[in-house]
Image (cartoon, rainbow, N blue to C red):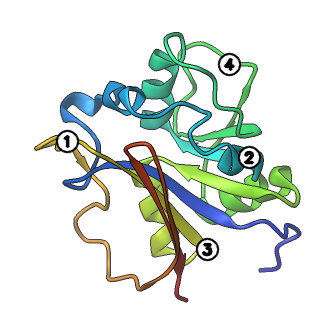
Amino acid sequence: MTHASTGKVVVNRVMSLDGFIAGPGHTMDWIFEHMTSATFPEVMAATGAMLIGRGTYEVGKGMSDENPAYDGGTQFVLTHRPLGEPDPNVTCLTGDIEEAVATARRAAGDKNLEILGADVAAQCLRRGLVDEILVYVLPVLLGDGVRFAPPGLDRIDLEPLSNIQSGGVTMLRFRVRK
């Protein structure tokens, strides 16, 4: 498969120190106690499109009224059922994860495609579609919730690229070894 894009496919995650990307009940409000869209503006500037899982989209939509908008370019939601109410800012995709990534990469142009959502990220990792993983580690222990990686994901070796601290947030960037 050839890619028209020169950008990368990047799994973008916020994580508690104990390895959760969402708290019990899929809560994510704890993120905004530590981060804003201005925490690492270079990440937003490098992003041309986002491929978002349905669950993450729903949680994010519920929080968008209270928190500043993150402009990561064209938004695609991977879902098997229509959205409750149409969203003019979102294109729904169904079907194969490789087709969804290819569609979203075309929209990203020369910028990165950001992958958001535990299930979509795991599907992309299983199929070898991810170039980098970007993790923001926040200074909080949640104790329970949605794990960074689901059970059953095979071992994936990573190469550390960088780590940067901004306030209490540490950003870790890894290349996925293929």
Q: N-terminal of the two: label 1 or label 2? A: 2
Q: Which residue is drawn at the image coordinates 66% and 50% (left, top)?
A: 43
Q: Which residue is drawn at the image coordinates 27% and 45% (left, top)?
A: 139
Q: Amino acid at mark 2?
A: Ala
Q: Splitting the image into 4 quarters, where does residue 111 fall?
A: bottom right
Question: Which residue matches tag 2?
Answer: 49
Q: CA distance from mark 3 to mark 2?
A: 15 Å
Q: Residue 178: horizontal and vertical position, in percent?
A: 55, 89
Q: Residue 41: horizontal and vertical position, in percent?
A: 67, 42
Regarding residue 130, the answer to whether it shows in the image is no
Q: Which residue is drawn at the image coordinates 31% and 62% (left, top)?
A: 149
- For this orientation, the residue located farthest to the bottom is 178
Q: CA distance from mark 3 to mark 1?
A: 26 Å
Q: N-terminal of the two: label 4 or label 2? A: 2
Q: Amino acid at mark 4?
A: Asp
Q: N-terminal of the two: label 3 or label 2? A: 2
Residue 91 horizontal side relative to residue 56, left or right: right
Q: Quick check: marks 4 and 3 in contact, CB under 8 Å? A: no
Residue 135 horizontal side relative to residue 41, left or right: left
Q: Quick check: marks 1 and 2 in contact, CB under 8 Å? A: no
Q: Is disc 1 surrounded by few (<14), some (14 to 19) or many (20+) residues within 10 Å?
A: some
Q: Residue 58: horizontal and vertical position, in percent?
A: 46, 26
Question: Which residue matches tag 3?
Answer: 131
**Image disc number at residue 87:** 4
Q: N-terminal of the two: label 4 or label 3? A: 4
Q: Amino acid at mark 1?
A: Gly
Residue 149 horizontal side relative to residue 170, left or right: left
Question: Which residue matches tag 1?
Answer: 145
SS of the residue at dot 2? strand
Q: N-terminal of the two: label 4 or label 1? A: 4
Q: N-terminal of the two: label 3 or label 1? A: 3
